């Protein structure tokens, strides 16, 4: 099968770093933190990621454009690069959801977390995690979001099932253990990664 990717030009204020691990990496001119262990792993894997393609926009519940993201397959898994602005500052839960629909204002159309293996929610849950559980991201005081996350063992083809897949940003951080959603609060931003068929 031909590997494909969706990549965008980042929001100009952000310079994103590639990674090859399950943990987030952030790097931009605003001095966001960088996870050194992830960078070490990225160097060990090498730069075999698929070339760039097109951006995927994400919006707020009222339809406001909040930035874009890109998807890229790499030897480490599916890389999700986030480049956002005008978002509420602070830690935010972020997950892949089962349905590729982003209908505001609450994005309930995206369904529950992407969970093809039937596990419980949370990276710290002994019966988890959902396949779509991601580490929390941090929006800076200026409303900028610039992080790269990697889901190990996930491919673009998996996201394109009959229901599609969406990425949802939540109002609160994920506690990484409470089923079914980590107490991460309202859905404040959404992007269709693969549209529902």
Image (cartoon, grey):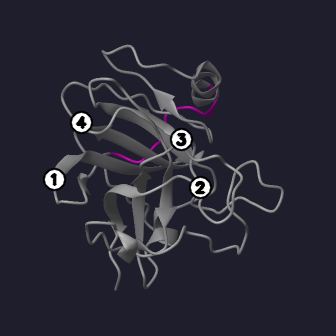
Q: Is residue 41 visible?
A: yes
Q: CA distance from mark 3 to mark 4?
A: 17 Å
The 10 Å Cα crowd at callout 3, few under 14, some 14 to 19, many 20 or more, is many
Q: Could you give the CA–CA distance between mark 1 and mark 3, rounded to whole angstroms?
A: 22 Å
Circle nearer the N terminus (4, 1): 1
Q: Secondary structure at mark 3?
A: loop
Residue, disc 2: 133
> Which of the two labelled residues, at mark 2 and mark 1, occupies the earlier sequence position?
1
For label 4, the residue is 85
Q: CA distance from mark 4 to mark 1?
A: 11 Å
Which residue is painted at 54% across and 44% down in the image?
Answer: 150
Asked if the residue at tag 1 contacts the one at tag 2, i.e. Cβ–Cβ closer than 8 Å, the answer is no
Q: Residue 64 shows which numbered tag?
A: 1
Q: Where residue 83 sits: x, y (%)?
A: 30, 38
Residue 119: quadrant of the picture: bottom right
Residue drawn at x 49%, y 73% as measured from the top left: 98
Between the C-alphas of marks 2 and 1, the distance is 25 Å
Q: Secondary structure at mark 2?
A: loop
Residue 185 x %, y %:
48, 55
């Amino acid at each position: 099968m031909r590997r494909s990717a969706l990549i965008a030009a980042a929001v100009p204020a952000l310079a994103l770093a590639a990674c090859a691990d399950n943990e987030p990496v952030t790097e931009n001119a605003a001095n966001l933190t960088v996870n050194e262990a992830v960078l070490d792993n990225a160097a060990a894997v090498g730069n075999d990621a698929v070339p760039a393609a097109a951006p995927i926009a994400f919006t707020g519940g009222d339809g406001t454009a909040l930035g874009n993201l890109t998807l890229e397959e790499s030897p480490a898994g599916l890389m999700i690069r986030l480049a956002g602005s005008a978002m509420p500052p602070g830690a935010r839960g972020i997950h892949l959801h089962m349905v590729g629909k982003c209908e505001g204002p609450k994005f309930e159309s995206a369904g529950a977390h992407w969970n093809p293996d039937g596990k419980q929610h949370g990276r710290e849950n002994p019966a988890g995690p959902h396949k779509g559980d991601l580490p929390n991201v941090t929006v800076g005081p200026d409303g900028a979001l610039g992080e790269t996350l990697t889901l190990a063992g996930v491919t673009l083809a998996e996201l394109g099932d009959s229901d599609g897949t969406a990425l949802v940003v939540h109002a609160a951080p994920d506690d990484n253990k409470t089923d079914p959603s980590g107490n991460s609060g309202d859905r404040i931003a959404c992007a269709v990664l693969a549209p529902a068929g």
